[in-house]
């Protein structure tokens, strides 16, 4: 990798020299013998990416038709595409001497001036456009003119929505509407992060222009935050029409960088440099890869080269920073945005990205982050992300902040009242345990935000309201989680998992591959509580045995390339398995050293080789180990559905060995209410296969059969097996709680009420169960806490809850007991027992002489 990068640096520099020599030696008259090319054909060549072939033909045309600005424009644009900025500048200047009022030429001249480091000329062109605007506006008679004027209006700072409605959309209504009508609209939506609208516009455009590469590119780009397989498909479609389409190559490279497939990204970027050897965005991506691989000198050189043609191009640092932030390098990302803003203080995208970075850097930077988000929104009101963020800040202001020794826990007021303390205590427990285990201290409090609204969680976490199924996300000192009310999962394990990311991110200074970070977080969940985390399911087992497991180096990519939710789940599971393998075989110290090395900037392969094993060896030995582990699941059953002829034949010979068939037959017996038959069948399955999580759960069925047969003890035993393996299994927790209540087994009632609350902390029944259990266990502190949580859920018998809390408080806190009994009477003034208790309290307090 190191050699490759250095080689590419040399090639870029060679490319620049070549470019300079080429441009200075070029003379205009060389192509005089070329035949004239029709306009449609010329456009076709441009769209197909035949830039070099096209250029001499364009020179003939501009020579022969110097008064026609479209030829000058296409020639200038072709030269810009090839990175021949100086030549482009001269061409456009010459064109403008012939056609002073050409809008398209002047728009292109702005770009060319910037890329020739003459910003003052760019401003002059903008001023000129402003001066001619009203004159042009009176003469608008064609869709082309509408499109051009719309672009001028944008340049002059007119509100983008107005431009979209009054210029671009109107241009789309013409019979002979050109492709640009859709391209400029779609680009505007993309620039403002309005991906849904962008996608719609490009799809509509493609109905009219199905072979336009820019249209396919736009559609691909609209999937940057969505389904990546579509992004790849459409970018490939673009490249099949125009193999030199640099923006599409950038999209592909960006996807590969996200997948940590840096070598592949470099191949794509190298191809892009063959079209334009000094393309700033391409070089910015090279810089990103070099920074991520700790090749700082090479990275700086790429950045410098990216800025060689336009020295104050704010987009270079903006792009570098944006990608670094996506790799969790928020500090470095923020620095890059600050550099971009130093070059152009009005650059709203850098301001918005900086705001996002600061909001992920923890409490110290929060105020500045929100301030910048507001500024970005003021500057660019149509930007969807900025708008979302500003709207969100008002909602966050209403959150309750529970501050503890090491955390700021922010959540909705009602949720905070019910389970805030519980969550806060869990976080502190995770802090003590994990900081000690990994031998680190945190230098600031971690902020944990719990979102009752999934849309708000999405905006805070991804900048957009959509959420691809995450329970929580950790940025280091900032953790965002979906409220447990929004989905059924064990929120205690989620908090533990996310805070573990805070630890590993801190240890590695955010230089940790995704698979390792996720793997450790899942591993630590299971270490803390064996029913948390993930277990080998039938699906995982099949994937492992079918060799669908990724190599270790490709495991991070599995997260973003996942097509289905099951793929994502498996990405977590295989990452966990590798981590478990390392812990089991090489020990915790080896893992700690790997993390420390990553923090020093050493790459993952080297760190693993130093403290664990060479990656190739690790891949092989891990695959064998994972296979053995998978095979241990399910006993001697044939677990998967027989698919091949051989499997079907074997299944026919040994029908009893077919797990799925056995389970189906048991289900049939349940349907027929043949409880004895079902019991017999399921007992055999459970005995042979052991516990298998997921939908095909024989234990769940067997517990139900025992319930029907009134065999409480066996039912209990089976349910306990489920609960010990799967802390997300709400039905099992509910039933266990009911059984404990029937048996007046208060300890068990406490345990299963807590287990239910760990899945849904806002449910009334488990709080009620916990309250009753604590009362009977004579734990008045626990009882009061449970009773108070229950009160916040406004139960129908709230008066009696206040009364029972009062009774718990009599000994320890008469003043509070008195308050509770008054609240009981406020709810139910004729509440006889409460009245008696009030009298007793009044008497005893007079005796004790305690003032209220
Ligand atoms: Zn995670």
Image (cartoon, rainbow, N blue to C red):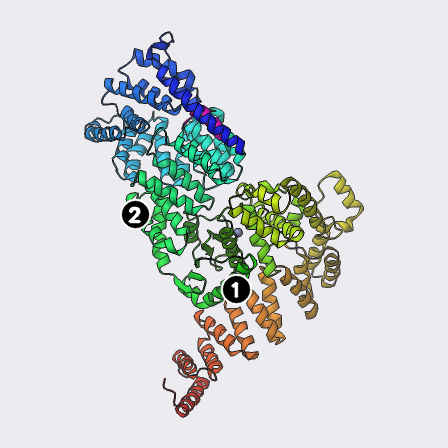
The residue drawn where x is 48% and y is 40% is: 292
Q: Residue 373 in the image: x percent, y percent?
A: 33, 49
Q: Residue 7 in the image: x percent, y percent?
A: 50, 28
| 242 lies above or below 691 | above
Q: Residue 691 in the image: x percent, y percent?
A: 68, 57
Tell which residue pokes out farthest to the bottom in this image.
847
Viewer-side residue, 791 vs 67: 67
Q: How far is mark 2 from mark 1, CA to CA?
A: 39 Å
- Ligand 1 within 8 angstroms of badge 2 C-beta: no
Q: Which residue is mark 2?
A: 375
**Image quadrant containing the C terminus:** bottom left
Viewer-side residue, 474 vs 173: 474
- Ligand 1 within 8 angstroms of badge 1 C-beta: no
For mark 2, give the secondary structure: helix
The label shown at residue 96 is none
Q: What segment is highlighted magenta in the picture?
A: 268-278
Q: Which residue is mark 1?
A: 429
Sequence-first disc among 2 and 1? 2
Q: Nearer the viewer, mark 2 or mark 1?
A: 1
Question: Is any atom of residue 680 visible in this view?
Answer: yes
Mark 2 neighbour class, 10 Å CA radius: few under 14, some 14 to 19, many 20 or more = some
**Image quadrant containing the N terminus:** top right
Q: Residue 445 in the image: x percent, y percent?
A: 43, 59
- Residue 525 appears left or right of 420: right
Viewer-side residue, 772 vs 89: 89
The residue drawn where x is 33% and y is 10% is: 29
Check contact, mark 2 vs mark 1: CB within 8 A: no
- Residue 232 appears left or right of 125: right
């Amino acid at each position: 990798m190191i050699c490759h990068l250095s080689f590419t640096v040399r090639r870029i520099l060679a490319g620049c020299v070549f470019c300079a020599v080429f441009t200075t030696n070029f003379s205009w008259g060389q192509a005089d013998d070329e035949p004239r090319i029709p306009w449609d054909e010329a456009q076709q060549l441009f769209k197909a990416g035949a830039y070099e072939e096209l250029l001499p033909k364009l020179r003939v045309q501009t020579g022969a038709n110097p008064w026609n600005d479209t030829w000058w424009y296409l020639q200038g644009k072709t030269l810009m595409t090839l990175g021949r900025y100086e030549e482009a500048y001269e061409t456009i200047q010459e064109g403008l001497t012939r056609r002073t009022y050409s809008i398209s030429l002047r728009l292109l001249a702005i770009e060319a001036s910037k890329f020739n480091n003459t910003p003052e000329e760019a401003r002059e062109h903008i001023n000129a456009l402003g001066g001619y605007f009203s004159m042009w506006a009176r003469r608008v008679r064609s869709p082309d003119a509408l499109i051009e004027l719309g672009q001028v209006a944008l340049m002059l700072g007119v509100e983008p929505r107005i431009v979209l409605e009054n210029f671009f959309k109107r241009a789309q209504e013409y019979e002979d509407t050109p492709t640009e009508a859709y391209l400029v609209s779609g680009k505007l939506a993309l620039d403002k992060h309005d991906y849904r609208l962008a996608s719609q516009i490009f799809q509509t455009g493609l109905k009219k222009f199905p072979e336009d590469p820019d249209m396919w590119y736009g559609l691909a780009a609209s999937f940057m935050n969505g389904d990546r397989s579509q992004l790849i498909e459409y970018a490939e479609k673009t490249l099949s029409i125009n193999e030199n389409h640099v923006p599409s190559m950038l999209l592909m490279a960006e996807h590969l960088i996200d997948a940590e497939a840096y070598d592949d990204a470099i191949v794509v970027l190298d191809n892009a440099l063959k079209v334009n050897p000094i393309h700033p965005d391409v070089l910015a991506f090279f810089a990103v890869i070099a920074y991520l691989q700790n090749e700082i000198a090479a990275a700086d050189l790429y950045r410098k080269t990216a800025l060689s043609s336009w020295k104050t191009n704010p987009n270079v640092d903006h792009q570098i920073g944006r990608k670094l932030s996506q790799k969790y390098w928020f500090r470095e990302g923020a620095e890059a945005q600050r550099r971009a803003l130093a070059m152009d203080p009005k650059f709203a995208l850098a301001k918005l990205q900086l705001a996002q970075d600061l909001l992920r850097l923890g409490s110290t930077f929060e105020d500045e982050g929100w301030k910048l988000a507001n500024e970005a929104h003021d500057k660019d009101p149509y930007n969807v992300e900025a708008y979302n963020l500003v709207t969100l800040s008002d909602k966050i202001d209403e959150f309750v902040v529970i501050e503890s020794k090491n955390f700021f826990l922010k959540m909705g007021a009602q949720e905070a009242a019910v389970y805030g303390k519980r969550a806060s205590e869990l976080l502190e427990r995770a802090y003590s345990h994990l900081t000690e285990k990994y031998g680190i201290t945190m230098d600031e409090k971690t902020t944990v935000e719990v979102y009752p609204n999934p849309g708000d969680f999405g905006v805070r976490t991804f900048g957009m309201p959509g959420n691809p199924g995450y329970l929580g996300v950790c940025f280091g000192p900032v953790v965002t989680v979906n409220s447990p009310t929004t989905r059924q999962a064990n929120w205690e394990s989620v908090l533990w998992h996310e805070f573990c990311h805070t630890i590993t991110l801190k240890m590695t200074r955010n230089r940790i591959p995704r698979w390792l970070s996720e793997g450790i977080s899942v591993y630590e969940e299971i270490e803390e509580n064996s029913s948390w985390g993930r277990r080998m399911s039938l699906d995982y087992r099949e994937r492992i045995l079918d060799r669908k497991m990724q190599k270790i180096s490709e495991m991070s990519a599995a997260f973003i390339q996942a097509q289905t939710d099951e793929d994502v789940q498996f990405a977590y599971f295989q990452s966990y398995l590798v981590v478990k393998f390392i812990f089991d075989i090489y020990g915790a110290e080896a893992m700690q050293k790997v993390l420390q090395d990553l923090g020093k900037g050493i790459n993952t392969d080297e760190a693993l080789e130093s403290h664990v094993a060479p990656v190739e060896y690790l891949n092989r030995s891990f695959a064998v180990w994972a296979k053995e582990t998978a095979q241990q699941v399910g006993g001697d059953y044939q677990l998967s559905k027989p698919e091949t002829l051989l499997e079907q034949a074997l299944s026919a010979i040994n029908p009893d060995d077919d797990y799925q068939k056995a389970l189906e037959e048991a289900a049939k017996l349940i349907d027929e209410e043949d409880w004895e038959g079902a019991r017999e069948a399921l007992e055999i399955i459970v005995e042979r296969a052991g516990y298998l999580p997921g939908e095909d759960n024989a234990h769940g069925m067997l517990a139900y059969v025992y319930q029907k047969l009134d065999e409480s003890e066996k039912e209990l035993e089976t349910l306990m097996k489920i609960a010990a393996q799967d802390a997300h299994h709400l039905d099992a927790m509910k039933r266990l709680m009911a059984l404990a209540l029937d048996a007046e087994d208060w300890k068990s009632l406490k345990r299963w009420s807590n287990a239910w609350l760990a899945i849904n902390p806002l449910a009334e029944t488990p709080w009620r169960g916990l309250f009753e259990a604590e009362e009977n266990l004579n734990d008045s502190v626990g009882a009061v806490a449970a009773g108070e949580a229950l009160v916040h859920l406004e139960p129908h018998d709230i008066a009696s809850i206040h009364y029972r809390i009062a009774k718990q408080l009599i000994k320890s806190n008469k003043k509070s007991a008195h308050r509770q009994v008054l609240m009981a009477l406020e709810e139910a003034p004729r509440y006889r027992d409460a009245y008696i208790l009030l009298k007793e309290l009044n008497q005893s307090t007079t005796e004790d002489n305690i003032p209220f």
